[in-house]
Every structure is written in structure tokens, then in C-alpha cells.
Image: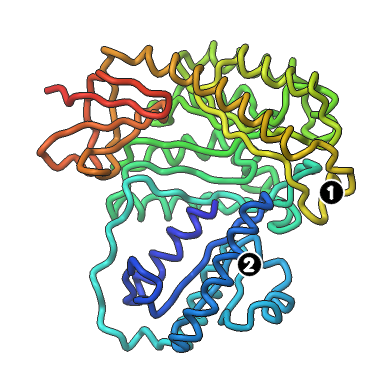
Amino acid sequence: MNDADAQRVGAALSGLGFCGRAEPEEADLIVLITCVVRQSAEDKTIGRLESLKGLKRRHPSTMVAVMGCLVADPATLRERFPWVDGFFRPSDVDGLVDLVRQRFAPETAPALPAERTPVSVSIPISMGCDHHCTYCIVRLRRGSQQSRPAGEILRETREAVQRGAREIVLLGQNVDAYGHDLPSQGLNLAGLLSQVHDTDGLLRLRFLTSHPGEMTEELISAVAGLSRVCPHLELPVQCGDDVVLRRMGRGYTREQYSSLLSRIRQRVPGCSIATDIIVGFPTETREQFEATADLVTAERFDSVHIAKYSPRPGTPAALLADDVPQDEKERRHRILEELQTRISQEINSTYMGRTVEVLVEGRHRGRWRGRSATNKLVFFDHDADWMGELASVEINWAGPWSLRGTVKG
């Protein structure tokens, strides 16, 4: 979601005549898009803001703006960081643009060439969330779910594809619940996928992040039946123990989650599945952690994003004693990381000798870089310009996190 906000900010500023700079010292305007979903993310943001204090002293005309989930109380932030020129809540691109116009009068600036549209463009389709996961700060910072009208989403999709995008990623804190708060529209995520799918020039369509309690049979059918929808799902489980899941407020059991995965794999053969897991949630015992490790072993996810629990002020879980020692959290994190590395290596090794279709997103260290429909990162060497194209790549090397191969044909 923050990446989508950054794309929208970049596009808006480009339209005002701004272009990117590699170094902060060279910039007239610095915008931080912030996340506070974990303490480490908030600490990183605070550290970056502190580092900009000296830059602002050396270059007082440089404008510094902050957007995102850090901005819960702008007045308090202004007192704490007086060198910041503006604070904007998540996705408030219009507010930022208004301040930039006041400061720089960019309508008088010479027009500059627009920056190239990314091959993959993220489009938020809803903000906020109606779930009450006890550890999560999203609802406190972004509010309850607010779905965007389908017409706006379809227009943004068409415009992005016309500018050169070939893949659209539909985003929501709980993307599967799209449209529940717009009953008069009569359109859920499955219906929206069907409409976006028909956009001329679009090659691929993804959506994230899903919630196990909202993944319907209709939505699974849409993934199975729409050719441009990629067979890859981001489906966070968070824990493999039912007691901890209840304390987390997740609303499902381990058995229900595994049953859902079974139905998805039956309907969408070869579908890759990524998940999120939190280790060290308050009261989590070693036995309960082992249940999570057992789940990872049994379900064989393509990738797992593992986070060590950190209390977020204002959430119900923050009232519980953070009683799992940090070194034990580190141990559990390391065990899962090593386990998932082995599983990812085994899964990716099955791609050896296979030819996969790769949507090329750019170059990295001299190689072309792109992703398969199952979200595998693939690199290859070739002299032709493959930017934004689909390449058939025969895989000849497989690691746990990426594949390499040779273009066929």
C-alpha cells in the first residue's frame, strides 16, 4: 500500500514538473512514505527524520514532507519534528500536491519529460480494514474499510496501461472484502477482477493482501477462470496454533486455514501461496510455536514473511505482557527462516529445465529481471530490449529466492 502511495506521489509530482534525484542533498523536495505496522519500521522512520534535521539546516529551502501511518497526530509530530514542512495522512496525495503548489508554484515551471511508468502498477481499491486483529495498528491509523468506486479503479487501470503498465496489482488491507461497504454498487472483488481483466493491453492482474476469512469460492473461481489473473495468492496465517489465533483475533482455526489451501490448490493447480507469520506473540509457548513450524512443513508455502512480535500502542495486544524474551523470538524467527529456505529451494528446484513466461520489469546488475505468473523472480541475459515484454525463459539455475535461465526462441 505504501509503495502504491509512493507511485501516486511520484506520478503527481512528475506531472508538476518534478523529476527524481538520487541524493537527498540534490532535492528540492523530500517525501517520506511511512509505515508503523512494526516497531522496527517506526524506528527506521524516526531515525530518517532525525537525519534530515541536519540537511534542513544546511538547505533551509528544501521541503520535507511526511505521509502515511506515522501521521496519526499531526500537531504532536509538528512539535517533535519542527523542521518538517507538512504531515499528511495515508494516501493524502491531494494534500501534498496542494502544499507543493503553494511552496514552488510548479505551474510556472518548465515541463519535464514524465518518468517511465513501471511495468507493474499498484492500484489501491480499498483503504482501512474491518477486522480487529489484536496486534494490528492498521485499523487505528487507516480506519474502517472504505472501498473505492469501481469506475475510479477502472479508469486508473486504463490510464496506467495506456502509459505503459502491463501488470496491475489491486491492493487493500483486506482486499477480498472489497465492495462489502458499497452494497449499492453490487460488485465484489470477483466481479471487479472480471472487469479489470478485460482492459485492452493488460497482460497480468494480481491482488493482495487476502484474509482467510474472506476468501470465497466465487473468488477462487475467478482466479481459476480468468486467464490474466496470476495463480499466486498472499494469504497470511500468522500462527499455527488455535489458542494463539484466538488471542490474535484472526477468526479462523488452523484446520479451516488448511482446508482453504486445499480447496485453492484443487481449483487452481500450481498456484503459489505466500503467507505471513508472527513469532513471539504474548503467551506463545514453545509448543505453540512448534505447531506453527509444523504448519509450514505441512503446507509448503512458496514464501513466508516472518516478523517478530512487537507491541503497537493502542492495540489490544499491547495490554498483554510481552513475555516472550527477545532472544527466544530471534530463535523462533531463525528456525522458521531456515525451514522456509529449505522448502523454497525444493519448490524452486522443480522449475529446473522448465520454460516459464516472465513479465520483464527492468534490469538488475546487467541482467533482465522479471517475474513468472507464480511470482517467481527470474533473471536472464539477452541483448534485446525486453522491458515490459513477456519472455519465455528456460530455467537452468534455481535458488530459494530466484531463478535464472535462457530466453527461448
319 horizontally vs 390: left or right? right
Question: Looking at the picture, which amino acid does disc 1 mark?
Answer: Ala
Q: Is residue 69 visible?
A: yes
Q: How is the image coloured?
A: rainbow
Residue at image point 28% right, 63% down: 115
**Relative to 206, does residue 120 appear above or below in the rendering?**
below
Residue at image point 51% right, 82% down: 99
Query: Percent from the top left, x then y, of residue 45?
Result: 59, 62
Quarter of the figure that contains the C terminus: top left
Disc 2 crowd rating (10 Å Cα; few below 14, some 14-19, many 20+) is: many
Closer to the camera in the image, 107 or 397: 397
Quickly name the residue at label 2: 89
Comes first in the chain, label 1 or label 2: 2
Question: Looking at the picture, which amino acid does disc 2 mark?
Answer: Arg
Q: Nearer the viewer, mark 1 or mark 2?
A: 1
Quickly name the residue at label 1: 318
Provide the secondary structure element on which disc 2 rests. loop
Closer to the camera in the image, 308 or 211: 308
